[in-house]
Image (spheres, rainbow, N blue to C red):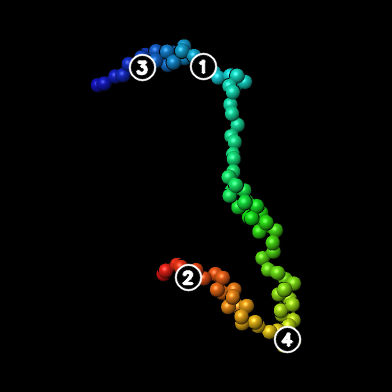
Amino acid sequence: MFFMNINRIDKIIQVYNTQGIKKIDNSKVNSKKDELKLSGKALEYQFAVNSLKNVPDTRTELVEKIKEEIKAGTYEVDGKKIVEKMMENINFDKRA
């Protein structure tokens, strides 16, 4: 049969307890606060995002005006303006 000597564990625990725990006094530690510096582009981006948050998703006045014109039969589509807007978003230098 195998028996363990438990007395040695008590001595190990006693060694850890007698060493003591060193505590750090936080009042003496000079800790720096985190600092964040944004680049010029980041500030512009932040401004743009905040501005977009204030713009409504739909321009209700314009939508209502167009609805009324359609109902009255007076709404006219300017094909040239449509083509111009479509062409603004096309990049001809890009190859698929």
Mark 2 and 3 residues: CB-CB less than 8 Å, in contact? no
Q: Tag 1: Cα neighbours inside 10 Å, few (<14), some, or many (≥20)?
A: few
Query: Where residue 6 is drawn, which disc sits there?
Result: 3
Question: Residue 31: image x %, image y %?
Answer: 58, 26
Q: Give above or below for 78 relative to 31.
A: below
Mark 2 to mark 4 CA distance (whole Å): 36 Å
Q: Write down the residue under mark 4.
A: 74
Q: Quadrant of residue 81?
A: bottom right
Q: Position of residue 37 (x, y in %)?
A: 59, 40
Camera sees residue 9 = yes
Pointer 2 local density, CA inside 10 Å: few below 14, some 14–19, many at least 20 = few
Comes first in the chain, label 2 or label 4 = 4
| Marks 2 and 3, how far apart at CA | 83 Å
How far, Cα to Cα, is label 1 from label 4? 85 Å
Mark positioned earlier in the residue sequence (3 or 4)? 3
Query: Tag 3 or tag 2, which sits nearer the N-term?
Result: 3
What's under tag 4, amino acid-wise? Thr
Helix, strand or loop at label 1? It is loop
Please tell me whether mark 4 sits on a helix, a strand or a loop: loop
Q: Residue 79: which numbered mark, if any? A: none
Q: Which residue is rendered at x = 44% and y = 15% of the image?
A: 16
